[in-house]
Amino acid sequence: MSDLALRECRIEADEVRARLPQRIRRVPVFLPALCRVRHGLKRIWLGEREMSAGPAQLVLLPAGSELDIANLPGPAGYLADVVSLPPALLARFCERHGSLLLRQRAGNELCLDIGEPGHRAWQLLMDSLRGDTPPEMREHHAEGVLLALALAGQAGPLLQAPAAPVAQRIRQLLMLDPAAPWSVETAARRLNLGASTLRRRLAEEDSGFQRLLEDVRMGQALQNLQTGAKPIADIAAASGYASPSRFAARFRQRYGLSPSELRRTL
């Protein structure tokens, strides 16, 4: 199985913590994900729309979206679990439960009160991710959360196919190694396409290779800063930036604060 196929089959979970308020703009979502706040409050802006979620809600993060996010600590700080879902798992879910797709409510509500069945399904998923559980059981529990959402008519935003499928495929490829010396030609070979064909398809989706590469590198850097303790210079190098100062400037331009300012909130 290829590295990209392995990535598409893996359920991943991260903890995001903060002791001071964070406001981060233009946060990219590369893989569909679910977020549950344990302490504090999360605010999300999708265009002009503002939504909020605390411990009683579940947050949907659709692939291909770009959100402004604020993480606001409570008395115990801010703590949230984020679970990335493999696109292949969502595709299998849609095949098995296609009739439920017709029951999904229209709209882009991302912060949901999913009720007791959804909360129980989420806890089973988290227990399986934190324990020594076989991958098949983890997938089973992840599908349980999706089923709870779908039965309540709330899974629509998560199950929608990305509007730009080729760009999404490129993002997933670049995420395997953001620091590599990527080029259009290299990425095209990995996807069994010609470079000119890849450029044309990305242009048809109003996208471009360099823009996608920058998005992935900045997204990887943000995740590493929020979920680990690596030195900022090491994160810059792992994200493909030889110069920490250039990395810091690009990070501030993208997210509205510098890596060191974000690190201080943690």
Image: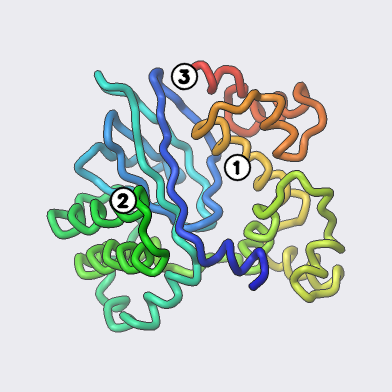
**Quarter of the figure that contains the N terminus:** bottom right
In the rendered view, would you say 87 is above or below 27? Answer: below
Q: Any mark on residue 219, and which?
A: 1
N-terminal label among 3 and 1: 1
Q: Residue at x 53, y 65 (%)?
A: 162
Q: Give the SS element for disc 3.
A: helix
Q: Residues within 10 Å of mark 3 (few under 14, many from 20)?
A: some
Q: Are marks 3 and 1 in contact (CB under 8 Å)?
A: no
User: Residue placed at 32% from the left, 68% from the top?
Assistant: 140
Q: Of the residues under marks 3 and 2, which one precedes in the sequence?
A: 2
| Residue type highlighted by circle 1 | Gly
Q: Position of residue 50 (x, y in %)?
A: 35, 40
Q: Is residue 90 left or right of residue 38?
A: right
Q: Which residue is mark 3?
A: 265
Q: Is disc 2 placed on a helix, strand or loop?
A: helix
- For residue 190, the mark is none
Real-space Cα separation, disc 3 to disc 2, in angstroms: 26 Å
Judging from the image, what secondary structure is the residue with disc 1 in?
A: helix
Q: Is residue 214 above or below residue 154?
A: above
Type of amino acid at the residue the image marks with label 3: Thr
Residue at the far front in the pictured view: 132
Q: Is residue 39 left or right of residue 251?
A: left
Real-space Cα separation, disc 1 to disc 2, in angstroms? 24 Å
* 1 or 2: tag closer to the N-terminus: 2
